[in-house]
Image (spheres, rainbow, N blue to C red):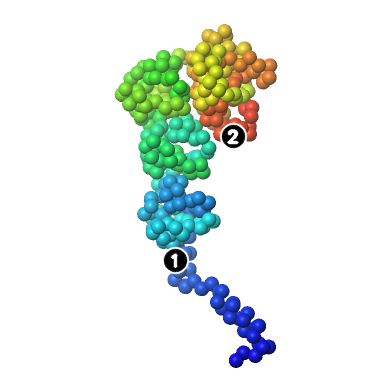
Amino acid sequence: MVSKVFAPLFAMVLGAVVNASPLASPESNALSALAKRQCAQTYTVVSGDTCAAIESKTGVSDAQLHQLNPGINSGCTNLQIGESLCVSGGTSSGGGCSQTYTVVSGDTCAVIESKTGVSDAQLHAQNPAINSGCTNLQIGETLCISGGSGSTGGGGGGSCSQTYTVVSGDTCAVIESKTGVSDSQLHAQNPSINSACTNLQVGETLCVSGGSGSTGGGGGGTTFTAIASFYDPDGGIGACGTVLQNSDFVVALGVDTWDNGAHCGETVTVEFNGITISVTVADRCAGCNDLHGPNSIDLAEGAIAALDPNYENDGLINVQWTLF
């Protein structure tokens, strides 16, 4: 019988024994340390994660995820927020992705391809977790946008000196008319376009001058360094007479470069921080010059989002733009 004097002390000791966590075996500690040494990439579980979500975000298969993380049960019901998982294995296979892209709100495959310059075929080949309809992108997901084969894409491995971004209403014939490339050139430089030209996507970036050394489009154009702002057309009719949406890759020229609408439908390339997009002249910005100086332009929101992912914080940006 425990005396009244020692009863509280006995209860404290007993509670400590009952509540103590079991000690990990030397073998499990060794395996854990080995796994950490061999894991080249980890992922931290966040609220709402499932195995399927993690696999989609990271590109690992279900079998790989369970093999690399044997602590996950077969039903994947024991994930814990904050838990660190291995999502690249100890096989040293290394795939070799030299450039990655993180999915942000509003991204589609077409938008990502426009931002990064990869083709639709390249994006899916380098990221097999993306389904054919591109409906399973997740914000925060990391994608590979340059492959391990060493090829740089862009029409058979050569350099693409001029690109064009598909806008609403484009067909192959319209693009060829705008850029000066022939139908055979357009298909040769962009093999992802099918023979009937029915799979163009708004925001998709096409090569319109190829590795043969031709520059297309007639002479290189005139380049300006100026301020670019952005606006939302919201379905209104632009000064060139077409209905414009916020997502369209279009530009409104200031009065000093408007030339009484002579450039309507022409292609403009805009460069900012190493990213170049192609937009179509579709509107006139009456106040651009007064507010932002000579040669300033106003981009639809879809276009500036592709040019500057941080546009909402940056506001006005200094760009180089070329009128062809």
Q: Position of residue 17 (x, y in %)?
A: 56, 78
Q: Identify the amino acid type marked 1.
A: Leu
Residue at point 45%, 69% (across, down): 28
Where, by quadrant of the figure, is residue 232 drawn?
top right
Which residue, given by chain and number where applicable, does mark 1 sit on? 31
In the rendered structure, find residue 310 and report the number of the disc placed on it. Answer: 2
The crowd level at tag 1 (other Cα within 10 Å; few <14, some 14-19, many 20+) is few
Q: Is residue 32 above or below residue 241?
A: below
Q: Is residue 9 above or below residue 287?
A: below
Can you see residue 265? yes
Q: Tell me which residue sits at (59%, 23%) in the image.
A: 231
Q: Position of residue 25 (x, y in %)?
A: 47, 73
Residue 282: x %, y % from top left: 52, 16
- Circle 2: element type: loop
Residue 39 visible from this viewpoint:
no
Amino acid type at mark 2: Asn
Question: Quarter-wise, where is residue 66 in the image?
Answer: bottom left
Question: Left or right: where does residue 185 sit relative to residue 243?
Answer: left
Q: Earlier in the sequence, mark 2 or mark 1?
A: 1
Question: Which quarter of the figure has residue 201?
Answer: top left
In the displayed orientation, state which residue is furthest to the bottom.
Answer: 1
Residue drawn at x 55%, y 18% is 236
Q: Which one is closest to the eye, mark 2 or mark 1?
A: 2
Q: Residues within 10 Å of mark 2 (few under 14, many from 20)?
A: few
Extreme-left residue of the structure: 195
Relative to 52, is 264 on the left or the right? right
Q: Position of residue 88 (x, y in %)?
A: 43, 53
Q: Nearer the viewer, residue 303 or 145?
A: 303
What secondary structure is marked by label 1?
helix
